[in-house]
Image (cartoon, rainbow, N blue to C red):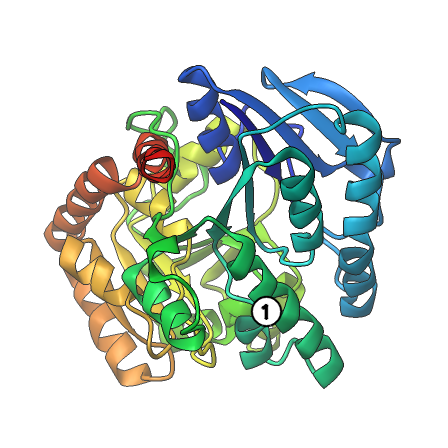
Amino acid sequence: MKLLFLLLELSPDTTASAMYPDLMEELKNHGHEITVVAPSVNGAETTLQTERGLQVLRVKSMPIVGVHNLIKKGIGMALLPHFFKKAYKKYLGDQKFDWIFMPTPPITLIDVVSYIKQKSGAKFYLILRDIHPQSAASIGLIKYKFMYDYLAKRAKKGYEIADKIGCMSQGNIDFIASNYPELDRQKLVLLMNWQKDEGYSEPKVNIREKYNLEGKTLALFGGNIGHGQRIENIHFLAKHYKDRSDVVFLVIGKGVKKAALQQMIEKDNLKNVIFLNFLPRDEYLDFIKSVDIGLISISEKYTVPTCPSKAVSYMSLKIPIMAMINYGSDYGTIIENAGAGFWAEGDKKEKVVELFDKLLESSELRKKMGENGYKFYLENLTAEHAYNAVMKEIENEKA
């Protein structure tokens, strides 16, 4: 089949594992022909080229990734459909596709999807990772009614024209079904987060010795550090355990709230937090594999069920999870049922400390939960599982 992916970002780094490239690689390896439309890197001119063995249309557009100014980012997102549609007509207009895949975010590209559907007769698989505009509004990122209404209209149209909507959990399925009762429930299918299985291997370098961390229990907060991650939870833990010389918090990642977290740590003169920026990939992986606890922090203000993708990375590396999440999310139950860690609503501080203490006190418990998480990952969260889930629904649609 010929499949078209519309993405907000496609890293030029072909060595790094990421959800959508991992799925596209799996599809390609099974004989499907993949075309990707994504913004160009650093504002470069529009080109149609081959990357990762895929046909990639890089579209010149306004910056949208890593933009801290919400107004500039909003303008860039609003104009992106114009740039995508123009480039599609010029470079891909004579090609036929069987299925279109688009993740959320962004939902603003839905008019581009509608155009391509009408022109090529392709079916549409919406990969629902963020539920907009409800999620952004609940944490205060949408302040104007006209903006909310615009995004709500785009989202509703997306659900209407989608032939399949891949949801991260049953909670996500139930949320969409409840808020959009007019939708055909058969569209809503389970598509959990995923990551390519590269096999587990022990660290090659003794990171604890290299960074003078021997005898320490290391808790990692890795990945995106954005508005939804509630950095206050990390600050709270670091402050609570400031007098424990054997507990160290590692922050590895980037995002619009990283600087704010650094300022909070510096203001309270907390010496138990280490911020790491760029590391060579091999050393980065060794560092991650050497940690004892993987932290997940989600704003409890979210009104939609959340399933942080960084949990998949933790599980794939046998790292037990301490998750501070929002109310009404079934993500904690997934962790609990897998035996992969603990969870609590983020504002229940006493409960968070109680559970974190359990992980600190028992290396055997941490090892057991890490192994449980790895088993759950292998059985449910690999790119191969995502491929099988997608193809099952595509075959059902054909039937």
Find residue 361 and report its image quarter: bottom left
Residue at 65 percent of width and 33 percent of height? 120
Q: Toward the viewer: 228 or 218?
A: 228
Decide: is 393 above or below 189: above
Is 97 situated left or right of 319 in this image? right
Is 113 situated left or right of 69 in this image? left
Number of residues whose C-alpha sits closer than 10 Å to that of mark 1, classed few (under 14), some (14–19) or many (20 or more): some
Is 76 situated left or right of 120 in this image? right
Q: Toward the viewer: 395 or 358?
A: 395
Q: Secondary structure at mark 1?
A: helix
Decide: is 202 above or below 178: above
Q: Amino acid at mark 1?
A: His
Q: Toward the viewer: 66 or 29?
A: 29
- Residue 218 appears in view: no
Decide: is 148 above or below 59: below
Q: Point out the image quarter for the C terminus.
A: top left
x then y, percent, for residue 398: 37, 34
In this rendering, the count of numbered labels is 1
Residue at 52 percent of width and 31 percent of height? 21
Residue at 47 percent of width and 39 percent of height? 19
- Residue assigned mark 1: 227
- Residue 267 appears in view: yes
x then y, percent, for residue 226: 59, 63
Residue at 24 percent of width and 41 percent of height? 380
Q: Toward the viewer: 117 or 148?
A: 117
x then y, percent, for residue 124: 53, 44
